[in-house]
Structures are given as C-alpha cells and as structure tokens.
Amino acid sequence: MSSRQTGSKVSAVMLGYSDGPIDHADDTDPLACRLGGHPLWLDETSAVPDHSSGICANCSQQMTLLVQAYVPLEDSAYDRVIYVWACNRRACAGRSGAAKVVRGHLLNKEYALKLVKRKRSAYSKDKSKPAVAVKPNGAALQLDFGSVWRTGGEEGRAEVSGDKDTAGFLSGGSLFSGPLFSGSGSGPLFGGQSASAEQQKAEEAAKEQNMEEKELADKMDMLGMSERPEEIKERVEWPDITAHVPSQYLEFDGEQLSDGQIEDRYRDQIKQAIDMAAEATGKPQKAKASASTSANDEEWSDEKYEHSTRPKGTDVGFERFARVVSQNPEQVIRYQFGGEPLLYTMQDPAAQQLGIKQSNADESDESDDDEEEELAEADSRAATKKSMLQRHGYSTKQLPRCEHCNGQRVFECQLMPALLTVLPLAENVKPLVSDSKNNTSSAADRERLVGSQLLKTVDLGLEFGTMMIFVCENDCHGGKTGTDYLGKSAASMSRFGAAAYYEELVLVQMETHLD
C-alpha cells in the first residue's frame, strides 16, 4: 500500500487484486506489493530471516512465496513488509508449519523524525495548559503537599478550587501550622531538624545525579551512541530458490458492498438510525419501503439478511464468507489491521483457537438478528455493540503472544481462495515420492478410486479456504515499542538503521466441507 494504515485503531477493509505480471527487470523494489516471485529483502547489507522461515516443517522442502506486501502503519517509524510462504504440496496443506509469515522492519528516518516532532508538539501543548483550575468567580487555590509527603517536587502538588473563605482558611496555615507539620521539621513526625537536613542533602544528591545522567544521555544521543547498541547479526543469504511462481503486481482498493446485501458490521448503524427516526417522529419505524420507494430501495429495505430457516448444524461462517466474497470475487487478500477476519468456517480448530464455541457456530444468522434486536431494545444508544464474530465468542487473547514484547496478537490480513487461480501453483508443483498409503498397485486399482480418494493420488498443489495473519499489536522492534528509544536526531536513530525480521502467526482454514 502506498499510504500508511492507522495502527492505533481499526482501519477500513482494503481488498487486494492481481494487476498483471511484473517484468523480471522491474521486479526489484522490496516496498512494492506483489504476488509470487522471490522474496526481496529490505536492504542489501542487514541480516535476513533464517532460511527456516521458508522451509516447510512437514516435508522440509522450500515453500513458495505467495505475497510480499508493503503495509506501513501511521504510528510506526518503520517501513513494514509482510512476507507469506506456503508449501505447494497438497499433502502438507493445512498442517502446522506448512505456512509461515514474517514481518519486516526498515527504519524510515524521515518519517521517524516527523513522529518525534509530532510527539514534542503534543507534549508542549499539554505543558502550556493552565496549571490552576479557576472558577467563574475567579477564585483559585493551590495546595502544595510536597512539604508533607514530597515525592518529587511538583509531582506532589494538588490544585483545588474554592471560594474566598475556603481559600483563606487553607492558605492561612491554620490547618497545617501545628507542630506535626512544622516547616522546621521539629515535629514528632519528622524526628527533628537533623533528619530534615539529611533528607534535603539526599534529595539534592539525587537531583545532581539525575542531571549528570541526563546530560550524558543527551551527549550520547547527539553523537548517535547508545548504552546498549543493537546487536549486529551476520547476513546469511538463502540458497538459490527454485520453488517460486512468476511475480504479479498487487493493487489495493477499498471494499465496496452492494445495498442489496449489507455486511453484518453495518447492521448496528442501520438499527441506530431506525431508532433515532422513531424517537424523532414518535412512531415506530419499520425497515419497509413506502409506495414511492424505488425498486432498488425496496429491495434494500426489505432485506432481512437472509432470514431463512436453516438445518441444524449449518455452518454460518461459511455462508457469511460466501455472501461477502461473492460481491468482490476476484479479491486475493483482505487487509484490516486490528480488525476481524472473515472466517471460512466456524467449525474447525482455527475458529476454536479464536474463541468460537461449537455450540455458537451452529446457530443461524436468524438467531443472531433476534439477539441484536433484543440488545437494541434494551439500549439503542450503546456506545459499542458486539460484532457478529464477537457474539460467537471471537477473541485473539488465546493466541500466542509476541515473543519479543509479550503484546497480544491482532488480525492484519488474510489470503483468499482466488489466489489459487491467480498464481499458477498447480503448474509448479515439485512432488516428492508419494506416501505408501497413497500409492496404488495397478492401473485397475486407480480406476476404482473416485472422488477425494482419486484426488489424493494426484498432487494439485496448495489448497486452502483462507490464511489469516496475526501480528504483534505493538508492531514492536525486537521488543522496543513507541519512538522514545530512537532518540531525537537522525544520528541517534542510525543505530536502528538495520533491517529486522520477526516471525508472526498464521492460521489456515481448509475446505473441509468438501470432504
């Protein structure tokens, strides 16, 4: 993507499409979004991911690069690239370690300096705010409790507003003028003048030490030095990669949904608008078209989100997946940092790992609508309402945390089935010797095989329903988050100039409903 995505809140859904082949001579930009091809590393000198990142954990063969996407975040100082590999053998599809994802970081100094400047500006605005609360009548009062429990000068100060009588009482010292709070420190609480003097000396010594450390840190920052310089790793190039498919351009566009099939996440907005209209007119509003409504509007307003009776055990997730994808069938990737995936099914281990309960997954959308109507009647102005997935128990809290900063993982993107037809994966299968259990002893035996049994004797390459990518919510750099550790100058940032790569999490859902 050419523009940075909002990392602090959920971004809009972006859909990726193939935009034709890339000429080999032009396939050199690591910050270009592309499908297939060889991995292009972020620079030519830094260490690259370990070669194991591209090796299938099941057959130990080189996996095929499916996507390399440039996906920078608004609050990140780094250019970000997501690499996704998968084993192109049908026998490995869907198994653990047969698909891997790596997040790449390369410091963008120019943008990093803008972030630091923006943060300074925000800090200056906060410091420039009035320190005293003033009432309309002008009365104001400051109480400094630092002399009683001083923990750091101005940090122990409290501001209180009140009338003149209250101000006079408190400022007159009658409340704090007793021997217990004596400024001389002779009261019984402080144990005499000597203890107060020793405390004052200790505070002054601590301040001097803090000043010296700050001056040293500023000097080191100006020189581009660091007390703990980032470890420089040796670059070990990958061997010649033979498992690849020709690269194609990857273009992104916003998701467009037709009025006739409103996606689940817009239902709350529609219900809120109906409730507001009912309150304004004093009459209950129904989502039905009037006689003057156009045919298209009538189709939209009468849409009940497929309120049809389904047999028990129907996979609501797959129905929703098919309904949404049918509106943009050529999409090969869905991107929404911090959003929710479009589950291919709600009845597999991946869905359960995301908190989806089997009992909930068997319910129909009709029951979902009934629940939403009850919630809307109870509180039509709720600040936040659960999405369809959340009502089924969706959560990423159960996923493995980032091994560097211990942050939770959040959804970033997912690969879609159309990718299997866009990339010539079946034509580039390099099968191993077939497993003995799949071998047939004669042509006659093979003729007796039908359906899935016959398919198992032919390796057609990669297969999946969807591949969901989950990444560190902090977009950390080896455990470091934010921008403070970068320093305030381009020189200080140089110590973080090397590219870095971190393996993230991928969950694969298969076409199990075809078995």
Image (spheres, rainbow, N blue to C red):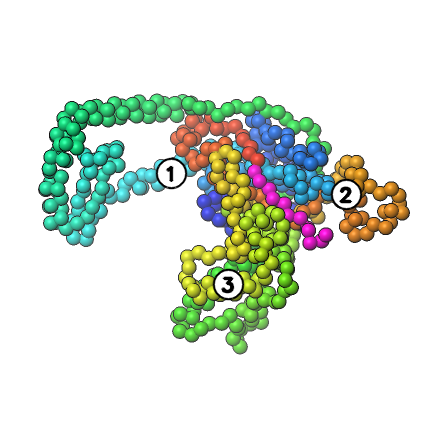
- Disc 1 residue type (three-letter): Lys
Q: What stretch is highlighted in magenta?
A: 504-515
Residue tagged by mark 2?
459
Q: Residue 119 carries which label?
A: 1
Residue tagged by mark 3?
371
Counting from the top left corner in percent of width and height, residue 74 is at 47, 42
Other residues around mark 3 within 10 Å, as few (<14) / some (14–19) / many (≥20): few
Residue at image x 13%, y 32%? 187
- Depth check: 221 or 167 in front? 167
- Disc 2 residue type (three-letter): Asp
Asked if the residue under mark 1 is in contact with the one under mark 3, i.e. CB atoms within 8 Å, the reply is no
Select label 3 or label 1 by which is in front. 3
- Alpha carbon separation for disc pair 2 and 3: 45 Å
Going by the image, does 19 lie left or right of 90?
Answer: left
First-in-chain label (2 vs 3): 3
Counting from the top left corner in percent of width and height, residue 107 is at 49, 32
Going by the image, does 509 lie left or right of 124?
Answer: right
Counting from the top left corner in percent of width and height, residue 514 is at 71, 53
Task: Check the image and report above or below for 339 versus 152.
Answer: below
